[in-house]
Each structure stands twice: as C-alpha cells, then as structure tokens.
Image (cartoon, rainbow, N blue to C red):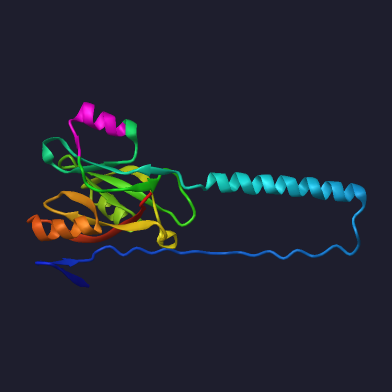
C-alpha cells in the first residue's frame, strides 16, 4: 500500500494490531436478610474490595513522560529516551545532542491498551531503532545486527485514541528516526534519502 506525499511516494511497512478481552461474573442474591454480624462482615469485605480496586487502578495509571530525540556522536544515528537521567548522561558522557524534533508523551509504566516500545541498538554504528512490534524486534535481534536495549516506555494503543497523535518511522542508510505526521511529510518531501517505514506508534499530546 502506498501514499503520495508531495513529490515522494512512501510505503507503509509496519502492521500493528491490538487484541482485547472481557470477562463478566454473576452474583446470586441472598435468600434472607443478613444478621447484624453478617452485615458488619459484608461491609468490611466491601471496604476491602474497594481498597483493592483503588490499588489496582493506581497500578495501571498512565504515568506520562516526555519523549526526547537526540543525534548520536558524529551524527551516525538517532537515539530516543524518556528518562531525564539517561538523557543527561547521553549528552555529557557520549557526546549526543538533543534535537528540536516535535515529540510528546509516552507512559513510563504499562497500562491497559498500551503498547511497549522497544529500543534496538544497531551494532555496526551508533544508531538506534524504535519498534512496537515484537515480531520485528525478534527478527532484527535474531539477525545479529541489533541488540535489544529493552523497553523505552509504553505508547498509546488504538483504544486510547483521544488526545493522541500518530508517530511515523523513517529510515535512511541505517539511520532510523521518529516524526509526527506534519514533520514526517516535510522530511519525505525535503530531505533526500529518507524513506517512510510506516506508522510506528501513537503518543499522547499532553
């Protein structure tokens, strides 16, 4: 499948999919009114259940953090992080530079409907690739040309469309970069050599 972007034609290469499931339980009503002691026990159980639900909700909250793009030393590639400490070390210890590429927010922790983002390091030079596809991750790492750097964060899934925007991945001579749609179109039309890999992920605008 291809699209015309100004003077260039780009091929969409990544296929992303989500699967969701739901379960429901049925409670049987009591045959008689509970005694005072039973009522107290039921109240205590309800309170405990409510606390459990609150804790579960807290554990799946979306903890948004800013996603940053950096160029690696010598301009060999691009590096992405949502960790301020890692960003500072990348600049001070590895000579990377923060770009002005417009990127927004991902989640630091997993959440319902979220998609893990893996950062892969290219072994031949200082260049990195981001993917949300476990199949692509396994294929690239299995080729021996990439090392899995682990999960960068969690992107918004298809069920989290409100307040999100699409991010695309582009490639050029063993360099890979992410770009929101308007920036992606500008890169494809105005920067020679860059090709569109396809839709990479959704991230949060705020």
Quarter the N terminus occupies: bottom left
206 or 46: nearer the viewer: 206
Queried whether the magenta region covers residue 196, the answer comes back as: no
Residue 71 as seen in the image, left or right of residue 142 = left
Residue 5 as seen in the image, left or right of residue 113 = left
Where's residue 79, x and y in %?
23, 42
Q: Which residues are magenta?
A: 86-98
Q: Residue 12: which quarter of the image?
A: bottom left
Which residue is drawn at the image coordinates 15% and 41% (left, top)? 125
Where's residue 44, x and y in %?
79, 45
Above or below, 182 against 86 in this view is below
Which residue is drawn at the image coordinates 44% and 62% (left, top)? 159
Picture mark count: 0
Where's residue 65, x and y in %?
38, 42
Above or below, 205 against 70 in this view is below
Q: Residue 199: which quarter of the image?
A: bottom left
Toward the left, the furthest residue is 192
Tell me if residue 92 can be seen: yes
Queried whether the magenta region covers residue 94, the answer comes back as: yes
């Amino acid at each position: 499948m291809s699209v015309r972007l100004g003077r260039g034609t780009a091929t969409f290469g990544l296929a992303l999919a989500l699967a969701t499931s739901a379960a429901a339980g049925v409670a049987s009503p009591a045959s008689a009114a509970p005694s005072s002691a039973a009522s107290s026990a039921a109240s205590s159980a309800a309170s405990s259940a409510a606390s459990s639900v609150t804790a579960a909700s807290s554990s799946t909250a979306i903890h948004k953090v800013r996603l940053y793009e950096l160029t690696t030393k010598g301009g060999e590639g691009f590096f992405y992080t949502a960790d301020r400490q890692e960003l500072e070390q990348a600049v001070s210890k590895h000579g990377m530079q923060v770009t002005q590429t417009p990127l927004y927010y991902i989640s630091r922790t997993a959440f319902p409907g979220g998609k893990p983002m893996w950062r892969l390091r290219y072994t031949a030079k200082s260049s990195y690739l981001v993917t949300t596809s476990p199949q692509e991750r396994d294929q690239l790492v299995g080729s021996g040309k990439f090392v899995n750097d682990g999960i960068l964060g969690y992107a918004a899934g298809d069920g989290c469309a409100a307040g999100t925007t699409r991010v695309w991945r582009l490639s050029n001579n063993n360099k890979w970069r992410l770009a929101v749609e308007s920036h992606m179109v500008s890169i494809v039309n105005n920067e020679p050599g860059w090709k569109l890999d396809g839709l990479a992920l959704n991230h949060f605008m705020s």
